[in-house]
């Protein structure tokens, strides 16, 4: 049973920084892609950043230049460094691991971590 556990959320003032971490347990393989999504109250969940096992990262336009995603394949971890935070970044941030293995697709989610940016 794969489990993703996020940490690093909290309350920060606008312009500040936070670093989110996500560790995956219960997996015997490296995930094709790992990423971060967020969901603000009353809004749909949206992609923040995503990184594949062998490719470059992808970012939402709203976070380009401010957020950096990285992963440690050996540890099955993914990180999100968030700088120059804005109040509109306030949301629950979810870790995601997705891909295919042996012709079957998988899509795992963490429980989420709250990020609150005060103005």
Image: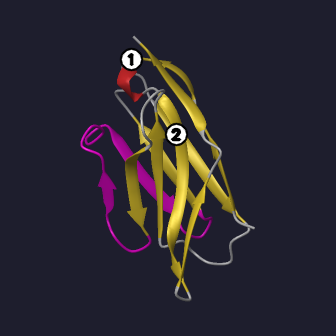
Front residue of this view, candidates 117 and 105: 105
Where, by quadrant of the figure, is residue 3 drawn? Answer: bottom right
Specify the quadrant that holds the N terminus.
Answer: bottom right
Where in the figure is residue 90, as x and y percent of width and height?
Answer: 45, 26
Residue 20 appearing in the image: yes
Relative side of 40 to 57, left or right: right
Where in the figure is residue 94, as x and y percent of width and height?
Answer: 54, 45
Where, by quadrant of the figure, is residue 119 drawn? Answer: top left
For image coordinates 68% across by 72% down, the residue present is 27
Describe the element under mark 2 as helix, strand or loop: strand
Q: Is residue 70 magenta?
A: yes
For image coordinates 56% across by 89% down, the residue present is 102
Describe the element under mark 1 as helix, strand or loop: loop
For image coordinates 34% across by 27% down, the residue present is 84
Where in the figure is residue 57, as x and y percent of width and height?
Answer: 33, 59
Task: Point out the residue furthest to the bottom here.
Answer: 102
For image coordinates 60% across by 36% down, the residue present is 113
Main SS, magenta region, reads loop
Relative side of 84 to 37, left or right: left
Where in the figure is residue 88, as x and y percent of width and height?
Answer: 36, 24
Instruction: Please name the residue that numbered disc 1 is placed on.
Output: 14
- The first of marks 1 and 2 along the sequence is 1
Instruction: Please name the residue that numbered disc 2 is placed on.
Output: 93
Residue 73 in the image: above or below residue 84: below
Q: Is residue 103 magenta?
A: no
Relative side of 33 to 95, left or right: left
Residue 86 appearing in the image: no
Task: Point out the residue furthest to the top here.
Answer: 119
User: Which region of the structure is painted magenta?
Assistant: 53-76
């Amino acid at each position: 049973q794969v489990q993703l556990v996020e940490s690093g959320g909290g309350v920060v003032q606008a312009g500040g920084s936070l670093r989110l971490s996500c560790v995956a347990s219960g997996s015997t393989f490296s995930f094709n892609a790992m990423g971060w999504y967020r969901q603000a109250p009353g809004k749909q969940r949206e992609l923040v950043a995503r990184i594949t096992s062998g490719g470059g990262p992808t970012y939402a336009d709203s976070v380009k230049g401010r957020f950096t995603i990285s992963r440690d394949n050996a540890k099955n971890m993914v990180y999100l460094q968030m700088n120059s935070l804005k109040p509109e970044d306030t949301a629950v941030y979810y870790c995601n691991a997705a891909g295919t293995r042996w012709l079957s697709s998988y899509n795992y989610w963490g429980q989420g971590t709250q990020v609150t940016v005060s103005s």
